[in-house]
Image (tube, rainbow, N blue to C red):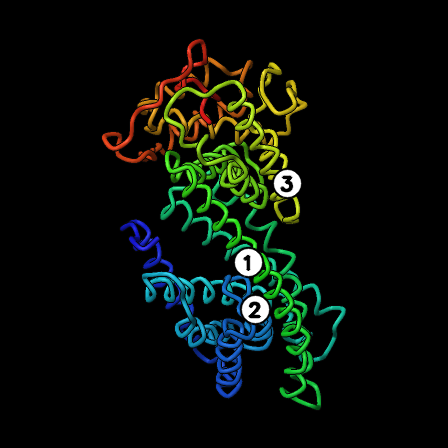
Amino acid sequence: MEAVPARARVYIACAAMAALLCLLPPQGVRTPWWAVALLAALYAGCERVARSRFVGISHPSGTFYPVLLAGAFLLPAPAAALVVVPGALLSQVGRRPVALRRFWRAAQLVLGVWAAATVHRLLGGRDAVAAADVPYALGPAGAAVLVFCLVLALLDGGILAVAERVPVRRAWRGLVARSLAPIAVHGLAGLMMAVLWHSPYGPVSALLVLLPMCVSWWAFAQYHRERAAHQATIRALVQAVDIKDGYTRGHSERVGQASMMIARELGMADERVEVLRFAGILHDVGKLGVPTRLLRKNGPLTPEERRVIELHPEYGHEMVRGIGFLGEARAAVLHHHERLDGSGYPYGLVGRQIPESARVVAVADAFDAMTSTRSYSRARPVAVALAELERCAGSHFDPVMVAALVEAVGRTGWHPAVTADDEKTRPARVPPPGAPLSSRPGAHR
């Protein structure tokens, strides 16, 4: 999102103004500035290390929340919120606009830490930490962590709604559930830091808590590096398919996008939405095993040639079945040409025998095929394509998936691209006599 909508800028400006108010020191409250400076330097340094080449954490959840929460347990609320500012404003940002994203991150964390510190103080947590009364300190600390998580989720959902136009009913879905467990672990580490801070060994002993956290983050980063390598492999496979079958260039990415729209409309968890996006992207990877002359043939296909092309789901399944994180995407690659009435291929599965992921990709695949111009068919208007999907729902396609796509496209729109080369430079391919029209769902290669 390089072009930030005006409404999102207003939202970020309001959050920044609220954060500035939280940084105002209250009258008569003594602030240990040396502790603020030490924690701020520690947080900024940890953030730089977390995003260094050695560790390589780039997701915001990789931030060093234990330092921030330790500040919330040790300091007055405005001072604890001030710990955030240097590290957030100097953090590395991978996407533009860099300055706006830094201000947003700083405002979000300032508000979260301020709220957590306020709740912790009101519940008597600071006295329990100073007295090392750990059993009692767990209650206020747990409440503070919960408030911290809720504030971040509230602000994250708001930015999704105003900047990404995510529907309000889905903007906050799952945000708290996904982040509460890891933030709770960070909160426990922050509490340990705060208790050790008041021990005879002082702040130096508190730093020891970060050592196991650094090891866990490094392992977390290696996992994501491996996942990134898998994704790079997936992109290479898709590019190879696009090069081999030039008539459908870009088709895989659009099927992935449509599959994701259907999954989100059905209320699936974000992890499963991502898997279905991969399923859509990889659904035609088996075409790498089909002779190029058949994929680029401009005349009608013989029955033998069509049978060869219909092997591509099985080829694709063999190619991706060793990629563990794809999960149910492998089933979608194998079964995306099955039909509810059993007339599909490769196995002629019927109804619910077809995996749900394959039913999602089948609808997305047919929709993009109908709304894209190819050598043997002109693009159909989106409304016509959706009407054709609805007509074939129950026989070819799962009606639930069709209804979800209709709803999603009606709300966000669809902008199909021309995937064929210039038609003036390529002769049109005519479907064989008696064959289904290429503009019908499922008739594309």
Q: Quadrant of residue 292?
A: top left
Residue 373 appears left or right of 217: left
SS under mark 2: helix
Mark 1 residue type: Ala
Mark 3 lies on residue: 318
Give the percent coordinates (x, y) of residue 329: 60, 39
- The residue shown at (55%, 72%) is 68
Mark 1 lies on residue: 229
Residue density around tag 3, few if under 14, some if 14–19, many if 20 or more, within 10 Å: some
Say if mark 3 contacts mark 2, CB within 8 Å. no
Mark 3 residue type: Glu
Nearest the eye: 423 or 138 = 423
Residue density around tag 2, few if under 14, some if 14–19, many if 20 or more, within 10 Å: many
Earlier-in-chain disc, 3 versus 1:
1
Residue 199 appears left or right of 229: right
Give the percent coordinates (x, y) of residue 266: 54, 32
- The residue shown at (47%, 29%) is 365
Q: Residue furthest top?
A: 434
- The residue shown at (59%, 34%) is 332
